[in-house]
Each structure stands twice: as structure tokens, then as C-alpha cells.
Amino acid sequence: QVQVAESGGGSVQAGGSLRLSCVASGGTFNNYNMGWFRQAPGKEREFVTAIRRSGASIVYADSVKGRFTIFDDNAKNTVYLQMNNLKPEDTAVYYCAAGKAYSVRYDYWGQGTQVTVSS
């Protein structure tokens, strides 16, 4: 059973930066797509970015392009989300998720970490 656990959330002023981490265990890291999602109060959970093993591609939501960067460290089974130039609208609970490389689904989810950006 794959497990993922996020860390690194916190509070920051607009324009600041945060780095989130997500450690995966219980599976072969490179066999899983790794994604970040977020859910703001009163809103649906939305996709932020992902590393897709099939085709070795990285995708970003338009709202974070140029500001957020996803990268991984295979030796540590960890995926990171570097968030720069944060905006108040980035405030949300951020979730890490893992899905099998040949699937579009994310089956394994972390508990989430809160990111709060003040203006």
C-alpha cells in the first residue's frame, strides 16, 4: 500500500515563497505519477501540477505556471513543490497524490498541508 505524506506548509506574505515536500513509501517511486492538488475554503479541489512517468512529462495548471515548480528526488522518494511569488489566492490546503504510471487516476492521497498567503 502506497502512502504519501506532505510537509512544509505555513503562512507567508504575498510575494513570498514556500517549498512543500511529499515523501512516498510502500511502492516503487518511479512507477507512480506524483501530483499536487489544492483545495481552498468553499471551493472544489483543483489540480496544481504533476510529474507523469509515462512520457516523463510535467504539467502545470495555468494559474501557477511560471511561479510553481515541481521536481523530485528519486533517492529520497520525495517530490517537492517550490512555490514562488505567492498570491493570496494560492491560500489552500495542498495535497500530494500518487497514481499508477499508466493511469490518469490518483489513488493515494496525503492528509494535506495548509498554505496561507496574506496580502
Image: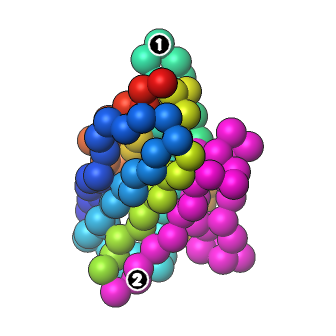
**Residue 117 shows in this picture:** yes
Nearest the camera: 54 or 102? 54
Q: How is the image coloured?
A: rainbow
Residue 49, percent across and down?
A: 59, 53
| Residue pictured at 39% horizontal, 57% vertical | 19
Above or below for 97 versus 15: below
Nearest the camera: 119 or 48? 119
Q: Residues within 10 Å of mark 2 (few under 14, many from 20)?
A: few
Does the magenta segment cover residue 49?
Answer: yes
Q: Is residue 5 left or right of residue 102?
A: left
Residue 115 occupies quadrant: top left
- Residue annotated with mark 1: 42
Residue 72, percent across and down?
A: 46, 74
Looking at the rendering, the stretch of residues picked out in magenta corresponds to 48-75
Does the magenta segment cover residue 54?
Answer: yes
Which label number is shown at residue 65? none
Secondary structure, mark 1, is loop
Above or below for 119 versus 67: above
Mark toward the start of the polypeptide (1 vs 2) = 1
Secondary structure, mark 2, is helix
Residue 82, percent across and down?
A: 48, 59
> The residue under label 2 is which amino acid type?
Asn
Residue 26, percent across and down?
A: 26, 70
| Residue pictured at 66% horizontal, 65% vertical | 58
Which label number is shown at residue 74? 2
